Image (cartoon, grey):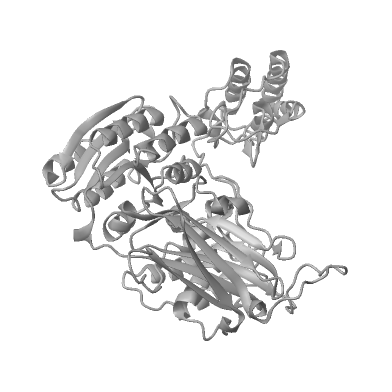
Amino acid sequence: MKLCQLDNLRHATNTVVVLLLLAACSGPRNESSTGQKSVDAESDSRLVQSIDSVGEIPVPPVEHGPASGRLVVQEEVVTAHSKLAERKDIPMAAASRLKSRDSVYPVQLSLQYSVASPDRENYAHVEQNPLRLVSEQPVSTFGFDVDTGAYSNVRRFLNSGSLPPQDAVRTEELINYFAYDYPLPDSKEVPFSVTTETAPAPWNPDKVLMRIGIKGFEVPAAARPAANLVFLVDVSGSMNSPQKLPLLVNALKLLTRQMTHQDRVSMVVYAGSSGVVLGPTSGIEQATILGALERLQAGGSTNGASGIRLAYQMAEQAFINGGINRVMLATDGDFNVGTVDFNALIDIVERYRKKNISLTTLGFGSGNYNDHLMEQLADAGNGNHAYIDTLNEGRKVLVEQLTGTLLTIASDVKIQVEFNPAVVAEYRLIGYENRLLRREDFNNDKVDAGEIGAGHTVTALYELALQDSKARLVDPLRYTQQQEKSHSQADELAFVRLRYKAPGGSRSRLIEQPVQVADIETFAVAGDEFRFATAVAAFGQLLSGGEYVGNYELADVAELAAGARGDDPFGYRGEFLGLVRLADSLTPQGLRVSQEF
């Protein structure tokens, strides 16, 4: 039963939990037996009396961070008795008594004092970006990033026969899973090119989509700097399934085979405690590294913080000046002993980030996968996050895209878009909900943002309603006085600014370019790259609830993607088309996305 695995609560909470377990684990009720009903009624009565004798459950002190259990409802932590009362396997009388004693405390999410079930995947709840009025908020600012973990995680849900929870869908990560044919930068002095394109939205032709894309300069594998990598491997009991440790080992074997004589590989494992299983070893000693991987076995609890500290110490010990120094954390993210407070883990990662040691997180498995923790740790570590659901995904991330995964060409990349109020009435950023920045953060070089790897492409889409559009959702104010605009300003849709730092640099550089009204083209004329990115954006929005896409359906997404597949050497776009059709088959009466795990 789902109640039979619980995190540590305070003493009073434990008392109630034990009582509920005794009731819940006693077996299913046989409603056909009158005698059994009588026994159950007496049991319920005794349970209610026992619960009353416990008194109010004290609220534990809450630390900032994500939670792994079912006590979390968006940004609230509910006392244990109320949340347990929602379980269907608790006697109704006891559940009612618990429900009547509900208390809600407005606090940040915490890893501590949460009731966990065997199926307790953790996703941060994020509302889709709302529509903004240009007259009130003409500037949009966010951090660019190349994480792609949400796409492969969504694929895992669909291939297992279910729709993903809405909170597992980060639309920008779905879009950025695919490479787009943006022009290469002219020189390494400016590490990436910036491209914009505009066309009507397929789900609402009275609105305009504006795409911003960047392409990083490419570094051949032979020119990659020397790498000092520390494999930080979770070997706890939760990793004991085929899609966890065995897949992890095979994926890291692929990475190991890409190492050369100039590279160094170390390996740290952690469960209840942590230890070094391989000291700094030349990348050319393949047999030694592969042998260490093959000897890994799963068992025990998960002290992730202990392993993180030790891995960073190993990276510091083997530090390569001018090279790539990175910890590769491979886990399901289910930290359950030691330091489990979110902020404490972030502090460790940020401290070593300042020493130019970055962090990549590789997620594995299902049931207890901590997506939120994995993504946020990678962000704090100036790294990237990927979810490995198949060995082919491991090959994509750790072989095909290895240089981009390891080699950062620009850090703290921020985008700021100023919309022209004479032309644009409303806008909405599609995705990037957890990467929004304040307007003043754009020019503040102390504010952390996203990193771009060699050869990476990154895409963002805005949906716009122009001043003369019938699709405007908000009526204009009667008494607003519009300022006169010059002819040149009237020709501009928006002005795009991009800031970035060179790796290891402390001062940002600025790129600026306008987006012209005259550049808006018909959707049919737009290229395959634009139309395919639009199809992925529509897919992500539909999986997230479809609030802004009107009557557009998954069948429409499939048709659009099929006609915009373009050059697809690895078959990723073809696979996407199959996933869209699979999602459509899983929702015969419209898109009904359950947030239950």
Query: At 63% across and 20% down in the image, what residue appears?
Result: 16
Give the camera-side residue of 407 and 553.
Answer: 407
Give the x, y percent position of residue 582.
48, 65
Q: Residue furthest right?
A: 479
Give the x, y percent position of residue 158.
47, 58
Left or right of 343 in this view: 216: left
Give the camera-side residue of 497 and 457.
Answer: 497
Query: At 17% across and 43% down in the image, what residue appears?
Result: 290
- Residue 304 appearing in the image: yes
Give the camera-side residue of 494 and 48.
Answer: 494
> Residue 178 appears in which quarter of the rendering?
bottom left
> Residue 194 appears in which quarter of the rendering?
bottom left
Left or right of 193 in this view: 131: right
Q: Is residue 551 above or below residue 158?
A: below
Question: Quadrant of the image for the C terminus?
Answer: top right
- Residue 584 appearing in the image: no
Q: Is residue 66 above or below residue 422?
A: above
Q: Is residue 267 above or below residue 263?
A: above
Give the camera-side residue of 461 and 9.
Answer: 461
Query: At 59% across and 18% down in the image, what residue appears?
Result: 10
Left or right of 229 in this view: 486: right
Query: At 11% across and 44% down in the image, what residue appears?
Result: 285
Give the x, y percent position of residue 415.
53, 60
> Residue 17 appears in which quarter of the rendering?
top right
**Picture mark count:** 0
